[in-house]
Amino acid sequence: MKTPIGKECKYFYGDYYRGRHIEECNLLKASNQTWSADLCRTCPVPGILQANACEFLQLRGVVNRPLTSGFQRRVQVTAYCEKIHKDVNEPHIGCGECHPLPPLFEIKPK
Ligand code: SF4
């Protein structure tokens, strides 16, 4: 479903039937976070879902006010692979278990 800013996101739910106006983010709802439509504007999730469709990738989202955004509310995402049971550092790319990358594209741990 498309978010209020027009990006496709599987976590967004909108019900506008017969004058209703119910909008929710199921990613933030799962973490008991308060959602508002402005968060979709800078949220990384639609980009991650577009780049990585792995069925084992689990995303978790929280709302923070990072210094880099001037303390504006932002969705921050962490990713976990249900197949290898490890955190995924680069959710756009994935953990590399199912779809190994050539060495040229590997990300070295910091
Ligand atoms: S906040 Fe992010 S995850 Fe939630 S509906 Fe908007 S784009 Fe999707």
Image: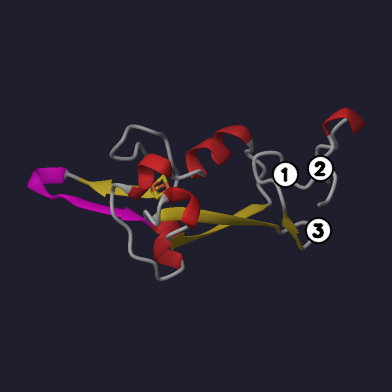
- Residue at 27%, 47% in the rendered image: 14
Q: Are marks 2 and 1 in contact (CB under 8 Å)?
A: yes
* Separation of residues labelled 3 and 2 (CA atoms): 10 Å
Q: Quadrant of residue 1?
A: top left
User: Which one is closest to the eye, mark 2 or mark 1?
Assistant: 1
* Residue carrying label 3: 84
Question: Crowdedness of circle 1 by 10 Å Cα count: few (<14), some, many (20+)?
Answer: many
Q: Quadrant of residue 78?
A: bottom right
**Beta carbon of the mark 2 residue lies under 8 A of ligand 1:** no
Q: Amino acid at mark 2?
A: Cys
- Which disc is residue 94 wearing? 1
Q: Amino acid at mark 3?
A: Ile
Mark 1: which secondary structure?
loop
- Point out the stretch of residues depicted in magenta: 17-25
Mark 3 or 2 closer to N-term?
3
* Separation of residues labelled 1 and 3 (CA atoms): 11 Å
User: Which one is closest to the eye, mark 1 or mark 3?
Assistant: 1
